[in-house]
Image (cartoon, rainbow, N blue to C red):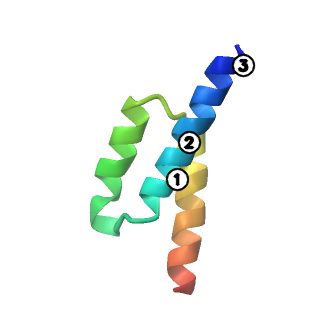
């Protein structure tokens, strides 16, 4: 069980890192890729919210 949680946490970190280099144009592809890899929708949406907020302040 712990191994599974650690693997999911690694996936989330990788997805978050990848999102930082995305544009609005490439977002859907990023989302689909990480959803297929097993990142939960809520985690992806949380990352998206933070990403959009930071894009507004740049």
Question: How many numbered marks have been drawn onto this rendered protein structure?
Answer: 3
Circles 3 and 1 in contact, beta carbons < 8 Å: no
For mark 1, give the secondary structure.
Answer: helix
Give the number of the disc on residue 40: none
Q: Residues within 10 Å of mark 2 (few under 14, many from 20)?
A: some
| Residue in the image at 62% along x and 36% along y | 9
- The answer for how far apart the CA atoms under marks 2 and 3 are is 15 Å
Q: Residue furthest top?
A: 1
Q: Mark 2 and mark 1 in contact (Cβ < 8 Å)?
A: yes
Q: CA distance from mark 3 to mark 1?
A: 21 Å
**In the displayed structure image, the side of residue 21 where residue 47 appears, left or right:** right
**Where does the image place residue 54, in percent across and percent down from the top left?**
57, 75
Seen at 57% across and 37% down, the residue is 10
Q: Residues within 10 Å of mark 3 (few under 14, many from 20)?
A: few
Of the pair 20 and 28, the residue shown nearer to us? 20
- The residue sitting at the right extreme is 2
In-front residue for pair 49/5: 5
Relative to residue 28, is residue 12 depicted above or below? above
Q: Nearer the viewer, mark 2 or mark 3?
A: 3
State the residue position of label 3: 2
Gap between marks 1 and 2 measured at Cα: 6 Å
User: First in sequence: mark 2 or mark 3?
Assistant: 3
Circle 1 packing at 10 Å, graded few (<14), some (14-19), many (20+), is some
* Percent position of residue 16, x then y: 52, 53
Q: Earlier in the sequence, mark 3 or mark 1?
A: 3
Residue 52 image point, x, y percent: 52, 69
Secondary structure of the residue carrying tag 2 is helix
The circle on residue 16 is 1
Where does the image place residue 43, in percent across and percent down from the top left? Answer: 59, 43
Residue 12: give its label.
2
């Amino acid at each position: 069980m712990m191994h599974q949680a650690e693997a999911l946490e690694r996936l989330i970190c990788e997805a978050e890192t990848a999102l930082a280099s995305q544009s609005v144009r490439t977002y859907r592809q990023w989302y689909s890729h990480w959803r297929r890899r097993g990142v939960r929708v809520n985690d992806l949406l949380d990352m998206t919210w933070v990403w959009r907020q930071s894009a507004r302040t740049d």
